[in-house]
Image (spheres, rainbow, N blue to C red):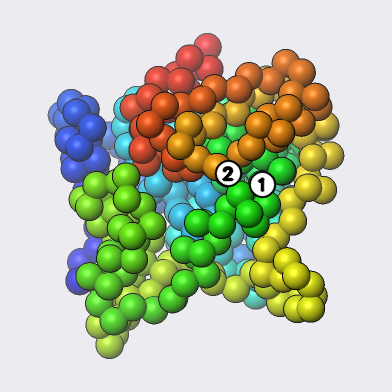
Amino acid sequence: MTGYDEFSMLADNASEVGLGWDGPPPVKRRRVELPGGLGLSAIVWGDAPARVVFIHGGAQNAHTWDTVVLALGEPAVAIDLPGHGHSDWRPEHDYWPPSMADDIAVAIRELAPQAELVVGMSLGGLTAICLGARHPELVPSLAVVDVTPGTDHAKAEPIVEFISGPQTFESFDDILGRTMEFNPTRTESSLRRGIIHNAFEQEDGSWTWRWDPVRDWKLTDPDKPTAGSPEFSDLWTAVDALNCPVVLYRGADSGVVGDEDVDELLRRQPDAEVVVVADAGHSIQGDQPRELARLLASRLS
């Protein structure tokens, strides 16, 4: 597959969920240089100052938000996490939320300093929580999509199994087949678009993911029973430090967030809101993009 145009499929995003289409909105790719010499990449939507910042989950990229942004109709910035999408991979393979939050802060200061709302999903949600704790001036309001620091290996088992699978596939059909196997509620067309954004064809015709498969926590403590599984419980202290409105969107069909996690969130942030999104799994932005856009719009002034 040649001639990849990352914005050529937006009309398909709109059509699939019944959005009107008068042509593509202003949208462009931007790179932000980081102090250490690496760079972050982001998609900037609209010509006006961004009102919303989007941070995707692990093994995803900024395009996971395309349909949500189209439905929302507000200027926004969607950032590729370090080691994902078009952002640089970290040589030390450190993709821990607190350190990624510091890089995301650099990008927000450059691309979206007036943003009213930060939205983070899964690993991006934990990163957004740390962003709010470490750089509160950049997070006036926080929306977390289907994750808490209580997420562990057991709750995230289907996700861990998928991203721990093969990194290289002989053909596009092979990588599509595995993706469809792990996302039975999604349409084939949406998964095709997702793969085109999240993988690339190598010179020999094989396909590989556009994210770093190595994580530093996979390289340490090999004798532990939980080796290969990150432990996020220490990040509850970041929840304690939040001083902004917080909402948790929980997929009704997802097991990534347990009732006990909601209880713990509300114990630490009594004013937080919890919204269960019907007919949605972990990827609410993929399963119910228009509903998520409607919910996010209600958070904007």
Q: Is residue 56 above or below residue 173?
A: above
Viewer-proximal residue among 145 and 212: 145
Task: Tell whether label 2 touches label 1 (CB within 8 Å).
Answer: yes
Secondary structure category for the residue under label 2: loop
Q: Residue 249 location in percent, x, y?
A: 54, 29
**What residue sits right under mark 2 in the picture?**
256
Q: Residue 198 location in percent, x, y?
A: 38, 61
Amino acid, disc 1:
Thr
**What residue sits right under mark 1 in the picture?**
151
Viewer-proximal residue among 47 and 90: 90
Quarter of the view holding residue 203: bottom left
Residue situated furthest bottom in the rendering: 204
- Quick check: 19 left or right of 136? left
Amino acid, disc 2:
Val
Q: Residue 83 location in percent, x, y?
A: 55, 64
Q: Is residue 209 above or below residue 182?
A: below
Picture quarter with the N terminus: bottom left
- Quick check: 277 left or right of 101? left
Q: Residue 94 location in percent, x, y?
A: 69, 66
| Residue 26 numbered mark, or none | none
Viewer-proximal residue among 139 and 149: 149
Q: Can residue 283 be seen from the camera position used here?
A: yes
- Crowd class of label 1 (few under 14; some 14 to 19; many from 20; radius 10 Å): many
Marks 1 and 2 sit apart, C-alpha to C-alpha, by 6 Å
